[in-house]
Image: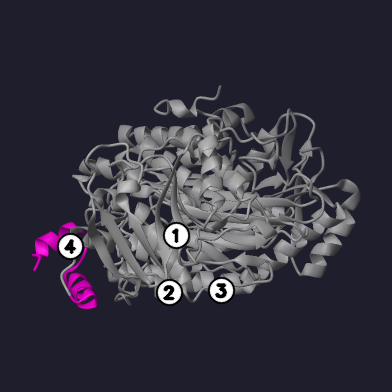
Amino acid sequence: MRTCQEVELMNLKMDEYNEIVRRLGREPNDVELGVFSVMWSEHCSYKSSKALLKTLPVTGPAVLQGPGENAGIVDLGDGQNALAFKIESHNHPSYVEPYQGAATGVGGILRDVFTMGARPVAILDSLHFGSPDHNQKNAYLFERVVAGISWYGNCMGVPTVGGETKFDDIYSRNPLVNAFTAGLVKKDRIRRGLASGAGNPVIYVGSKTGRDGIHGATFASDRLDENSDNDRPAVQVGDPFSEKLLLEACLELFETDYVIGIQDMGAAGLTSSSTEMASRSGTGIRMNLDLVPQREENMSAYEIMLSESQERMLLVARKGTEDAVRVIFEKWDLNFAVIGEVIADEELIVMHHGQVAARFPLTALEPPVYQRPVTPRPARIFSLPPESLKSDPLVQFSEMIALSPCLRYAGQVFHKYDFQVGTDTVIGPGADAAVLRIKGSSSAVALNLESQARLCYINPFEGIRAVIAEAVINQACVNAYPLGLTNCLNFGSPEKPEVMWEFSEVIRGMRESCLFFDIPVTGGNVSFYNDFGDSSIHPTPVIGLAGLVQGSIRQAEIVPASIFLAGELCENLAGSVYLRHFHQTPGGDFSIDLEAVKRLQALVLDCHKNGFIHAAHDISDGGIIYSLLEWIALCNGLGIEINDQQAFSSTGVVFSELPGRVLLLVKNEATARFISSAKDQGLPVRRIGSIVKNPVFKINGIDLDLENLLGHYFKASPELRCFTVK
C-alpha cells in the first residue's frame, strides 16, 4: 500500500487512490498510477466543473460539433464551409517559462483545430498580467509571452488577428495566457477523435517523444508558489516548423478515406490521446511503446506515456492503408510508426520491452465527478463619497491615459504579430472584432475575445452577463451576429468554497445569457488553481465568439459625419479603469439589462444593413472619451468636436464602462432614418458631436491637447521592448 505522501506527489488525494484500487481490484503499478494521475487531474478530467458545465446550452441550428471533441464546429451557412474554433489556457507554463509556455499554448490550440480537419486561419489571445511599468518580473513575463506567441504563430503562417491585453496586479504571480484558434473546414471533411474497428492500426506521427512536459497536466492542476520554477521540466518545448509540416501532412491525409480518427497528443500526451479515442468509440487499444519514436535514450514506459512533447498526433487508419499513410508523412519528413491496434474489449494494454507495462479496463479510468462545497458571498460593493467624484473629468482623463498601461494602443503588441499573412484579414487587431473573408465564398467570419475580471470579482453572475453582452455588441459593430461561443474559465482553487461559488455563478449567468441571445456553447476550457500560495486571481472567464458577417463586409470609415450615442446614459463606474486608477477599488453594485443590449444589437445590425452609418464602436475600457480617442487615432488628420453638456460633465457618464452604449458615425443624409430606426427599437439616441476636418479634440468648447493624448495613447513602455513600434 502506498503512503499518503507518495499519493500526494502524484497530485491525487488518498481517497482517490483508494477508489483506483477498488476499481482495479488491486494496487496499480507505477505506470498505471501515472496514467490515472494525469487523467484524473483537474486539467484533463474536469472533475470539479463537469456537473455545472453540463447545464450550458450546447445545441443549435448551426452547431455541427459541440463539447467533447478537440474543437467545436459551426456551419457557416454557405452550403460548404464550417468553422472550427477553440480556446485553451497555458497559464502556469507561461509563468515558469514564458516563451515556451506561450508558444506551446499556441501550438496546442492550433493542433486542436486542424485535428478536426480544419486549416487554421486565425489566432487570438487573451493576456492578463500584473502592471509592467514598475515591476521587472511582470515586464519580463509579458515580453517573453508576446515573443513566444509571435514566434509560433508567425512561423506557422497563421495570422494573430485580435484579442485583449489587460493589466492588474492580481495577476502579478499568476498571469493568464489564453489562446484561441479558428479554422475552416469543408462540412464533408470534418474529422473526429475516434478509434473504432477492431484490428485497425494505431499510428504515431510527428516529432519524436522526449522527456519534456512530463506531468504537464498535473502541473496545470496545482497552485503556483515560490518553488514553481523547479517545475520547468513540466513545460513543453515547441517547434513550429515541425508543426507546419504536421499540419500540411494531416490536411493531405484528410483528402483520402484512410482515416478513422485522429487526435492531438496534448495534455497527458500518448495517455490522453489513446484512452480518449478508445473511450469515445467503445473500444480498446493495445500498443507497444518500443515502437514509439524517441529522441532520448532509455526512456521508461512511465516517461513515454506521460511525455507532452509537442507536434505529435495519434491516428487510427483503416487496416491495409498503413503504407499509403506512411508515404504521406515520410514525404513531409515526419516520423511514422504503427505502434498498436484497436481491440474490441474496452481495455488499455501497454507493452514495453516484452512486458505488460499497464493493463486495465477503460471504464475504470472514468474520472470522479465532484460536487464541491460552495460558500455564497454578497456582491463586493465599495462605496465612494460623492465629493470624491467631483473633479473635472477631462483633466482626470488626461492623467489616466498618461499613467494607465490598460489604455495603451493594442497595436503596439500586435506589431509583433503577423496579422495579414494568408491575405484574408479584412479587419484586424484593435477593432471591436476581427473579420476574415473566406476565399471562394460570399461569407466572412467575425472573431472576438472578451473578459471583465473586475466586474466578475464584484458580482460573478452579473459580471459574465456583462462580458457576453459586450461580446455580442462588438460583433454587431462589425456587422456580424454570433453563431457559437467558446470559453476559457480562469479561477482559483476549486477546493475553496468561495471560488466554487464564483464559478457556479458564472456558469449560471453564462447559461442565462446564452439562452437569451440564442448562442450555443461549442466547447471550452476550465483552468482552476490559478493561485499563488493562498491568494487567488479574480474570477476571469474569457469568452470567445465566432460570428457570421451579415451581407457585405463593412470596415470602419472615419469621415466627417455626425456622432450619435445609442443607449441610455450610464453613470455606474463599477469595474472601471477610472476607479482602479484613482481610487484603487473595483467599484459598486451593477446589473445588466440584456433586453436593452439585444435592442442595441438589432439597431446596429439594422444600421449596417441599410447603410446608415460609416462606423460603430462600443464603449468599454476607459469610457466614452477613450472610445472617441480610438476613433481619432484612425482619423488621418481629422478630429472630433463634442457638444453635449449632460454626457460629458459627469464623471460617472464619462468613465462608465458597462455594456449597453454604442458610438455610431451616422451619414448626414441618413440621420432621420437612423433616428426612426432607433425609435422602432425603443432605444434612446442623441447626437453628441461630429467628425471635423481639422485635427482637434474639443469637448463642450474645451480644446483637449490632442497631440499629448495621442502621445500617451501610442506610448511604448520603457520596460517592454516588445512595445517598440517599428
Foreground pick, 105 / 70: 70
CB-based contact (under 8 Å), mark 2 and mark 1: no
Characterize the local packing of mark 2: few (<14), some (14-19) or many (20 or more) Cα atoms within 10 angstroms: some
Spot occupied by residue 348 in the image (x, y as percentages of width and height): 33, 65
Front: mark 2 or 4: 4
Q: What amino acid type is highlighted by mark number 2?
A: Leu
Who comes first in sequence, dot 2 or dot 3?
Answer: 2
Who comes first in sequence, dot 2 or dot 4?
Answer: 4
Mark pair 2, 3: CA separation: 11 Å
CB-based contact (under 8 Å), mark 4 and mark 3: no
Element under label 4?
Answer: loop
Characterize the local packing of mark 3: few (<14), some (14-19) or many (20 or more) Cα atoms within 10 angstroms: some
Foreground pick, 543 / 369: 369
Magenta extent: 1-25
Residue with the mark numbered 1: 525
Element under label 2?
Answer: helix
Circle number at residue 57: 3
Residue with the mark numbered 2: 52
Q: What amino acid type is highlighted by mark number 3?
A: Pro
Mark pair 3, 1: CA separation: 15 Å
Q: What amino acid type is highlighted by mark number 1?
A: Asn
Query: In this image, 382 relative to 713: left or right?
Result: left
Spot occupied by residue 447 in the image (x, y as percentages of width and height): 63, 51
Element under label 1?
Answer: strand
| Location of residue 484 with respect to 497 vertically, above or below | above
